[in-house]
Amino acid sequence: MESAVQGPPQSLTEDALLASALLGGGLPPEAEDHLWEAGLSYHLDDVAEGHLREAQSLAPGHAAVLIGLYRFYFYKGRLAEALEIAKQCLDKAAHENDFPADWRDVTADHAIFGRYEDMLPRFFLFTLKGYAYLHMRLGNLDEGRAAIMKLLELDPSDKIGANVLLGVLDRMGLDDDG
């Protein structure tokens, strides 16, 4: 079936299915239906958000629902709300990987972060990258920089692309001086 979603490059449902497959499955069919409906009604903010909240009530803390909420808030420019979901995703990623609860305490010894095929550690890295980016966009530059430096520590080959964010952050500092 062709996706009718207009807006984000990838539908919320595709993300939900990916997250479900990667992060434990177990998404109730009713929650999946609400994610699908959220994608179909993406252009109707209240309707789409209502479906996402219904999915959340049916599957609280499920990665598919969290990713759907994150993408919705992010693409709607509701960055503070996206950051709150990113924090929940970081908690979930730490728990799923059996990492320390505080991302600052995660070390390269906790997982092989450089292997593309290791989905759970990659989920943690992508989540931390989103967290860093959102902090930067919201003006919390020190927190954004700390998260970027943690990404580079965990992924020294920079498969995740943290150096791009670091470059933006460094240029922001230059703009302040000029």
Image (tube, rainbow, N blue to C red):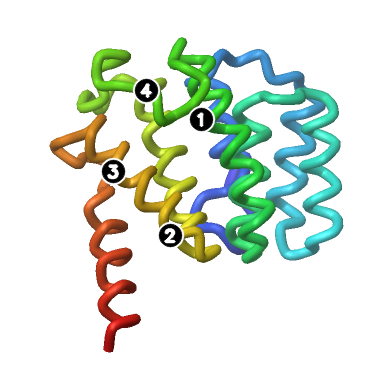
Q: Amino acid at mark 2?
A: Leu
The residue at the far left in this view is: 157
Query: Which marked residue is nearer to the observer: mark 1 or mark 4?
Result: 4
Residues at marks 1 and 4, CA–CA distance in whole angstroms: 25 Å
Q: At 26% from the left edge and 66% from the top edge, which residue is drawn?
A: 170
Residue for badge 1: 18
Residues at marks 4 and 2, CA–CA distance in whole angstroms: 21 Å
Looking at the image, residue 101 lies above or below residue 176: above
Q: At 76% from the left edge and 25% from the top edge, which residue is drawn?
A: 60
Other-residue count near label 1 (Cα within 10 Å), few / some / many at <14 / 14–19 / ≥20: some
Q: Amino acid at mark 3?
A: Met
Disc on the earlier residue, 3 or 1? 1
Judge left or right: residue 54 versus residue 101. Answer: right
Disc on the earlier residue, 3 or 4? 4
Which secondary structure lies at badge 1?
A: helix
Residue for badge 4: 106
Residue for badge 3: 149
Which secondary structure lies at badge 3?
A: helix
Other-residue count near label 4 (Cα within 10 Å), few / some / many at <14 / 14–19 / ≥20: some
Q: Is residue 123 visible?
A: no
Judge left or right: residue 98 versus residue 38. Answer: left
Q: Amino acid at mark 1?
A: Leu
The residue at the far bottom in this view is: 178
Disc on the earlier residue, 2 or 1? 1
